[in-house]
Amino acid sequence: MNLDGLDGFTVEVPSWAYGNSGTRFKVFASPGVPRNPYEKIADAAQVHRLTGLAPRISLHIPWDVVDDWSDLRAHAEKLGVKLGAINSNLFQDDEYKLGSLCHPDAAIRDKAVRHHLRCIEIMHETGSSDLKIWLPDGLNYPGQDSLRGRQDRLAESLRRIYDELGDDQRILLEYKFFEPYFYSMDIPDWGTSLLHCLALGEKATVVLDTGHHAPGTNIEFIVMQLLRQGRLGAFDFNSRFYADDDLIVGAADPFQLFRIMSEIVAVDAHLPSSGVNFMLDQCHNIEEKIPGQIRSVLNVEQALAKALLIDRSALATAQREGDVLGANEILMAAYETDVRAALADRREARGLPRDPVKAFKASGYASTVSTERAGGTQAGWGA
Ligand code: PSV
Ligand code: MN
Ligand code: MN
C-alpha cells in the first residue's frame, strides 16, 4: 500500500479546543483544563508529539493574548510546535450587536477594522501567515438593514484590512449560512466569500468550515470549485449532524470526508506546496479534549490515506468510457480499504506510537496536569 503522499501532510489544531466548552445551556468543566495560552499550547503539543501530524496551533484574539509574543513563540517552539493562524473575534463586544465590519455606524466598523490591524501586528510577532476572519455579522429580520449596503461596507472594511497585510501574509475568509443571525448572514456562502476574495486580490482566500453548510450540500463540489480558482486557503474540519456542531472530524460522515479528500488528492492539494491549510475547528463538550483532537487528526489522515489509494488512471478510463458502475466501484474500493494497520506501521517506522490515543492515556499527562492546574481559572471560550 503506497501512502507516500502522506509525507509532509499536516493538520493545524485550534487553541479553543483545549478550553472548557459546551452549548448555550451548559459549559462543563474538565479537570486540568489550560489556564492560559501557554498551557493550551502545551496540550496541543501532546497531539503533535503522539501523531507527528499537528505541528501548528491557531490562536484566537483576544482570548489568547499574552504580554510577550516572542516568549509564547519560543515556548511553542521548545515544545516542538509553531503558532499558526490568528483568528479575529468580532462576536463578543456589545457594540457588535448590529454587526462589525458591516455595521451601519462607521465608528463601529472602524473599531472592527482596527482589531484586525492589531491581529496583523501580532502575526508579525508570532510568525503567523494566516489571518482568519469569521464574520458573525447578519440580520434577523427583513428590512432591518440594507442587504446591499452591508456588502458595500464589508468590501470597504476588508479592503482596509487587506491593504495592511505583509508580503507573506494572507486573509482566510470564512463563510457560514446561519448563526448568530437567522434571516441573513453577511458572508453566508462560498460564493460571497469568493467574490470578496477576488475583489481584494491574490492574498485573500476562502476557508471552508465543513459544519457551515445547509444539510445535503455537496461540499466536495465547493472544494473542487475553489481549488479550480486557486482560492481554497484552508479548511476548518469538524463534523455535524444538525447545525454547527463542531464534533470530532469524521464522526458524522466519514464518507464525506473521503470525498473531500478525493478532490484534494486529484490536484495534489494535500502537498504542503499547495498552500491549503488543513485546520480543525472543534469544541469538545463532553469528551476528553486532547484525545478528541488526536482522534480528529487521525481521522483526517485516514481519509487522506484512502483518497491516495484511488486508482486514478483506472478511474479516468472508466469515466471516459462512460462506465458508470465501474467508476463508482473504483472510488468505493479505495474508501472501503482498511488502512488502519498501514497507518500504524507508518507511525511505528517514524518512532511514533502505533495507537496515539492509547499512548496518551498511558502517558499520565492528563492526571499530571489536573494536579498541577488544580484551582486555576479556565482559559476557554471567552477567557
Ligand atoms: C463560529 O461558527 C466558529 O465556529 C467559526 O467557525 C470560527 O471559525 C470559529 O468559531 C472560531 O472563531
Ligand atoms: Mn470555523
Ligand atoms: Mn463554526
Image (cartoon, grey):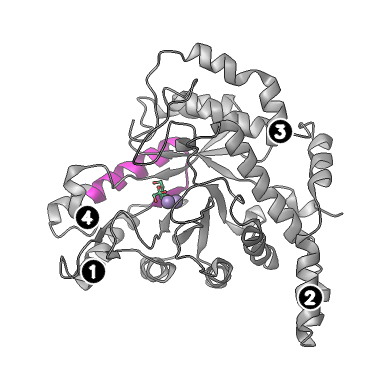
Tell me the CA gap for discs 3 and 1. 48 Å
- In the rendered image, which residue does mark 1 sit on? 152
Q: Quadrant of the C terminus?
A: top left
Q: Are marks 4 and 1 in contact (CB under 8 Å)?
A: no
Which SS class for mark 4? loop
Q: Nearer the viewer, residue 92 or 156?
A: 92
Q: Is the residue 312 above or below the residue 247 in the image?
A: below
Tell me which segment is drawn in magenta: 112-133
Q: Is residue 123 left or right of residue 161?
A: right
Query: Which disc, if any, is residue 90?
Result: none
Mark 3: amino acid: Pro
All told, the count of numbered labels is 4
- In the rendered image, which residue does mark 3 sit on? 356
Q: Is the residue 104 above or below the residue 218 in the image?
A: above
Query: Which circle's residue, 3 or 1, is located before the other in the chain?
Result: 1
Q: Nearer the viewer, mark 2 or mark 1?
A: 2
Query: Which disc, if any, is residue 99?
Result: 4
